[in-house]
Image (tube, grey):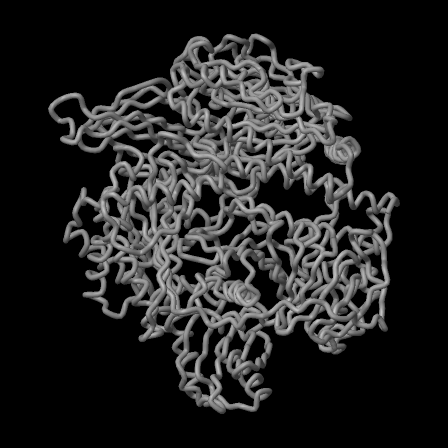
Amino acid sequence: MTSKPLSDVHMQVMWNRLISVVEEQAITLIRTAFSTSVRESGDLSAGVFNRGGQMIAQAVTGTPGHVNAMAEAVGHFINDIGRDNIFEGDVYITNDPWKGTGHLLDITMVTPSFRGGQLVGFFACTAHVVDVGGRGFGPDANEVYEEGIFIPIMKFVERGTVNRDLVNILRNNVREADQVVGDIFSLAACNETGHRRLQDMMDEFGLADLEELGEFVFKRSYDATLERIAALPKGSYDNVMRVDGYGSPVDIAVRIDVADDHILADFDGTSGPSPLGINVPMIYSKAYACYGLKCALAPEIPNNHGSLLPFLFEAPEDCILNAQRPAPVAVRHVLGHFIPDAVLGAVHKLVPGKVPAEGAGALWNLHVSARPRQDEHCPADGGQRAEVLLFNSGGAGARQGLDGLSATAFPSGVHSMSIEATEHVGPVIFWRKELRDGSGGAGRQRGGLGQVVEIQATEGHEFTFNAMFDRIDHPARGRDGGEDGQPGAVLLDDGTRLASKGRQHVPHDRRLVLQLPGGGGYGPRTERDPELAARDKAFGYVTED
Amino acid sequence: MTKDKQQVRLGADIGGTFTDVALEVGAEMFSAKVLTNYTAPEQGIVDGIALALDKAGLGFGDIDTVIHGTTLATNALIERRGAHTALITTKGFRDVIEMRTENRFEQYDLDIVLPAPLVPRNERFVLDERIDAGGKVLKAIDAAELDALVDSILAGGFESVAIGLIHSYVNGAHERQIREALLAKAPELSVSISSEVSPQMREFQRFNTVCANAYVKPLMESYLRRLVGKLQGEGADCPVFMIHSGGGIISVDAAIEHPVRLLESGPAGGAIFAAHVARRYGIDRVLSYDMGGTTAKICLIDGAVPKTAKTFEVARTYRFKKGSGMPISIPVIEMVEIGAGGGSIASIDSMRQIRVGPHSAGSEPGPACYGRGGDRPTVTDADLVLGKLDPDGFAGGKMQLDVAACDGAMTTHLGDPLGSDAATAAFGLCEVVDENMSNAARMHAVENGKELGEYTMIAFGGAAPLHAGRLCEKLGINELLVPPGAGVGSAIGFLRAPFGFESVRSAYVKLSAFDHAAVNATLAELRDEAVSFVRSGAPDAEPVLECTAYMRYAGQGWEVPVNVEVRDYAAADEAVFRKGFETVYEDLFGRLIDKLDIEIVSWSLRASSEATPAPAVEVAQPERDAPRDTTRRIFDARSSEYLDAAVVARADLAVGTRVRGPAAIIEDETTTIITAAQDVTMQADGCLLIRSCA
């Protein structure tokens, strides 16, 4: 029973079990959440931590944006609550963008886990809620104060008693109070699920605490990560990628320093902050940078304190990827989603041939507010008001041996919604949602195609929408001689060009036309396999001869 | 026909490797297993039937009924061996089946490949028409455009045509109009329309389902007609029925029309088999566990009814991962399938952890211990090292297992890299695969709001009895049944299935604007369709009707199934639906949400003939202990050491005889392992009842 190999087997089984526990935690949340982005895109995370607040396991969900945020979260909670103030039956809460996951719409909750009166660890989870008040989900605020209610790290439940004052304040500051408060209770319940499963597991394996298991997980993960890093050529590799931003272009500059025992990604040279809500708190920048590095260098090593330890990040305080309070940050995902492409550009110099060309990057999230017309054309039954949220993806970059994925999200892990289901939610009609011919960058491997979406209000209605689109002025670049993908465009069906960011109106008799960007190609187009070129032509993937 | 007035019924299951036949003559069961014949599957069945008839001393003319299930449709989808198929869809939506969910099924792999659509882009045609979410026609079909479309389809030389239009589940008029236009010019053309094959909301799933139907239809039609002819040629002029994915029986003609309903019919038979055992024992909550050579399948069976779903995924291309296959929206017995079977291969990852599956050594070369050239350690090899299998007693002693090859594979690929001996490596391998299976079961239970601690496990399939005991320990399950005939469980399950059909339809109803007339109309439509399918197989049946409304709070994306009565509803019955929903919701999530509207998204109605009788079995309590004359060393996972385990032949166990664990109950097809913390008692119907001795 006590031989080393035998105890290693037990450790591995318990490690697997812990991952299963946090996956269960995440599923519990997905099943009960109201928020569209939790249900449809898995915009949530869940994790288990040891007594010291170090993350032992994290669920793999639809968003890489929570990777490091989750890992650091519990440390902030322990600091701000104070170790002496942690009791059995407590639950803590925050939506602090700088200590949570980058914007007020994500609520993080942490629950200490006790066994026999002793603190053994923590459970944490995060979910994107429907509303936090303020201006709503859009880029137009100038300060975080305009973006909604800010909940500093505090107790939501103390020794089993819910903080009713906080619930009352929340109810009076958000638009969909029942759903938001409902989601907060779901978050608490999901930590409770994790706690109960952990107790079962500790019973089964006769564990008093998680410390030894945590050390095993950290050591194995850290060693495996270091082994990967050790195999890399030492040195510094850099890349700059320019994207549209809001009003003025943004440069994402990154330098990767590979040392024996760590990799540092430094964002020195990146553009300064924006006056509008596309700024990114450092915690979110780190998460996407780390995701980019891990995808390329150590994809199969699970996220935990040990595997994340060798990845270090720096950014100047006055840059858009390290925005300081009170900068507006509501749509921090737009730039966040570009960080992996920027990082992968540097990784390509480090290990050529392993990473894709640039892709569409940021999702084209479309938030539509549909209203009945306020004139004699208003429908007889008064019509319908509705908020409709839709995720759309452009083309991904070509890989060294494979074409890019068409209309597929990267780095985000979202699912698109069904058009038929969406037309039941609000008074809108989609006339078109299909691949955008000719939008993938040419190359030996072709970039993924973007898509075209055409949407109109139903009879008697009109709508406004919050634009948060990018790669209209700065397309995805090809790699190694591959050509750029087509840039995107935001139009009305009469050809009128609209702005890529901010709130805009679409008249009742017009369709909004979104042309999503394509991914970059890989290698010279002259080297393309003639059979693939012929297929592309037959299928209409390409429009030229 | 009937032998001494006893019914002679035959179940035949074509699986990926084996074709199983179960022949029931009165209360007696005769079975046969032959290799699946890929070029002429119907020949494989006939060979299997001949073997079973021979054992029973009967001829083809004695058979009263044949019930058949097959993976042929599934294989055609996986191997892309279907018909040359065209898709006709709404203009603007040509790429729905190619764009899928715009999602990567594996977050950290930069090189994933999405499954290619069943119908390539240049064979997808569009028509400028549109129906809105309420079923109203926004754009009518232009006759000239339709004519031209029909001409190009005919010019394309397609064997089969799928039609899938936006919102056709509300109003299928346009789909029918196109079909009529096609058939007017080509009466023999095979045409499938989505409003009949799968009238459910969500265009990707529905379009893909109708494409799959069209894709396998010519192939399945030709196979089924050949089979019926072949059986008649052999002298069996009895009716032939098909088992469908939802676990009911339909006529061959109905199956030919909707072959997509035959997907996963084999596994469905396994779940019915387990449900029948559950019914005999009066067990309310059952976890069925089927483990073969390549995968393990798990199904929840509450109230003796296997859990069903309205949609599932076939042909997963990436480690059985969700999202890597193609969605099919039809009623189906819901199962979790993971890459864990006897042949699953183990390896070491970068964190020096053992990983098992999903790659399988299959039957060729098979596990290292088969001595057919396999040199990678598999689950079966680990079972041998740990003493769970007897090298001299495998397959009733007909096959000698190669212990040296097995030890070699275990040591080279696991033991040496981990610095451990073969036994510890094998223990690690087994623990990992058992943990994978129990995690999958636990996750499935969580997704359905269930606690497995209250469940009884029923295990079948060649490898399941070797692992079921340990799985129960991991899941906190205290009772386990291993029925006899577990090797051909699916084929036996076919014989237990009712004539039944489940119709599904999306039809939005908000309770705040409850339209009882619309609800009644939907229910009537569903009832007529389901009943007519049942009557196609059982003309005199008075089917039992069960209806489920899929409901949610407005704004949620996940519906909960609410059982509702099939009757005429009045306006005031909004309250009935509300109460039904709230009861289920609170049960699942522990709380209700005030002030939110509730909506019904879709409906399913199942019509079935009376279930086949399941004579009650009185649980036999242990009366005596079997002698422990023969023992061998078997590794016990919980105690982490080899213990002396009793070895008892299943055939030698009398009813009420108990064997205390650790023990191995041996039979030709498999071995049932009783852990040190369990005992087993033989039951009157031949089941082994294993209980944990707390």
Q: Is residue A396 visible?
A: no
Task: Give the answer, above or below, for where A44 lies relative to A167.
Answer: below
Q: Residue at x 63, y 67 (%)?
A: B619
Give the left or right position of residue A131, taking residue B163 as reference: right
Estimate the x, y position of residue A301 in percent, counting from the top left.
68, 37
Q: Residue at x 76, y 42 (%)?
A: A205
- Is A244 in front, or is A314? A314
The picture quadrant where one finds residue B532 is: bottom left
Quadrant occupied by the C terminus of chain A: top left
Q: Can residue A467 be seen in this view?
A: yes
Give the left or right position of residue A298, taking residue B321 as reference: right
Task: Farthest residue to the left: give it.
Answer: A376
Estimate the x, y position of residue A418 in percent, counting from the top left.
37, 41
Estimate the x, y position of residue A371 in percent, counting from the top left.
24, 25
| Number of disc labels | 0
- Is A192 in front, or is A311? A192
Task: Farthest residue to the right: give it.
Answer: A3
Give the left or right position of residue A172, taking residue B349 as reference: left
Estimate the x, y position of residue A230 in percent, counting from the top left.
76, 31
- Is B408 in front, or is A302? A302
The picture quadrant where one finds residue B540 is: bottom left
Task: Give the answer, above or below, for where B435 lies relative to B628.
Answer: above
- Is A72 in front, or is A123? A123
Task: Give the answer, above or below, for where A296 lies relative to B336.
Answer: above
Task: Give the answer, above or below, for where A223 lies relative to B531.
Answer: above
